Image (cartoon, rainbow, N blue to C red):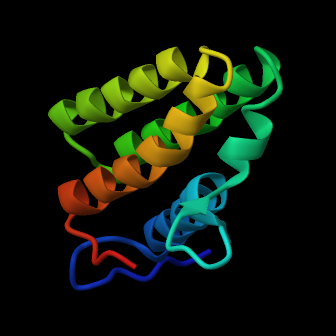
Amino acid sequence: MTTTTFSTGRTASAAARLARLRRLAWTVDAAFRVPGTRFRFGLNGLIGLTPAAGDALLALVSLYIVYEGYRLGASRQDVGRMLANVAVEAAAGSVPVLGDLFDMGFKANLRNLAIIEQSIGATPF
């Protein structure tokens, strides 16, 4: 299998991984819009309603995004910032109802995606 190198030095497989992360972060944090408003939420808001198991599953998805960011070349400092975002969302998400509302507004995965894109010099969406 051959890989194509872009002018930024990234390979085609890295670009495909970044595109996959964009879709995942969008699906988890902003896939749906409340009609008549600009407010968006994702599967995070629905899965998080399941006590404990939902929050644990969402934390694993968030940690996967951090891991892929590390593999794509995010700096150690940026990985630390992303882990802090995941920790804040996981801690707040453990509070029934209010934590789920916080998760829908905080959108840790989209924040982490922006950190990855900035760190590796990718063009956002």
The residue sitting at 61% across, 79% down in the picture is 36
x%, y% of residue 51? 80, 18
Q: Is residue 65 above or below residue 95?
A: below
As drawn, is 106 to the left or to the right of 73? right
Q: Choose between 58 and 106: the one closer to the eye.
A: 106
As drawn, is 51 to the left or to the right of 119? right
Kindly give the residue lying farthest to the front in the view shown. Answer: 36
- The quarter holding residue 120 reads bottom left
Q: Choose between 102 and 77: the one closer to the eye.
A: 102
Q: Choose between 23 and 96: the one closer to the eye.
A: 96
Residue 107 is at least partly visible in this image: no
Residue 35 is at least partly visible in this image: yes
x%, y% of residue 77? 16, 32
Q: Is residue 22 above or below residue 64?
A: below
The residue sitting at 45% across, 65% down in the picture is 14
- The quarter holding residue 84 reads top left
How many numbered badges does the structure rendering display? 0
x%, y% of residue 75? 19, 40
- The image quadrant where one finds the N terminus is bottom right
x%, y% of residue 41? 61, 57
The residue sitting at 49% across, 20% down in the picture is 92
- The image quadrant where one finds the C terminus is bottom left
The residue sitting at 36% across, 26% down in the picture is 83
Q: Choose between 109 and 39: the one closer to the eye.
A: 39
